Amino acid sequence: MEKNEFLEQHIFTGLENINDGYESEVTHYFSEAAFATVLERAAHFGLGIYVIEARLEGAVFGTYGHDKAKKKATDPKWYTQALSDFKKRQADLVYGATYKVSQKLLDRNSESA
């Protein structure tokens, strides 16, 4: 199983990708509520999140990464705090992220498929 396939099947399923022609067509963007669900699912599967990008009306509003937070990419404390901080600064943002899915998790899901 490939990383993007895993994300589609287990993390993004049932959520609307609102990437409206941003620079990277590959990156999925979500409303605040949907992105909170993405983060919950990421924590459940032990995924890493390297960087969260928030956008307002199509323009980049801000980015936050695990290195800036001085936390491991797999530590849900940093990314839930980042979402909370963005929400306090601005309403109606959309969110995208870069994810790390371990090979071990991909292999385990390939076997059960």
Image: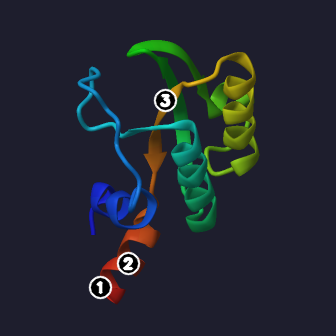
Helix, strand or loop at label 3? It is strand
Q: CA distance from mark 2 to mark 3?
A: 29 Å
Q: Could you say where residue 103 lies in the image, as x and y percent from the top left? A: 40, 65
Left or right of 67 on screen, residue 51: left
Tell which residue pokes out farthest to the front in this image.
92
Q: Earlier in the sequence, mark 2 or mark 3?
A: 3
**Residue type indicated by callout 1:** Ala
Helix, strand or loop at label 2? It is helix
Q: Residue at label 3?
A: 94
- Residue at point 67%, 44% (across, down): 72
Marker disc for residue 113: 1
Q: CA distance from mark 1 to mark 3?
A: 32 Å
Disc 1 packing (10 Å; few <14; some 14–19; many ≥20): few
Q: Could you say where residue 51 lies in the image, as x and y percent from the top left? A: 53, 32
Q: Could you say where residue 15 lies in the image, as x and y percent from the top left? A: 41, 53
Q: State if disc 2 and disc 1 touch (CB < 8 Å).
A: yes
**Residue type indicated by callout 3:** Val
Nearer the camera: disc 1 or disc 3: 3
Q: Residue at label 2?
A: 109
22 or 66, which lies in front? 22
User: Looking at the image, is 68 positioned above or below residue 103?
Assistant: above
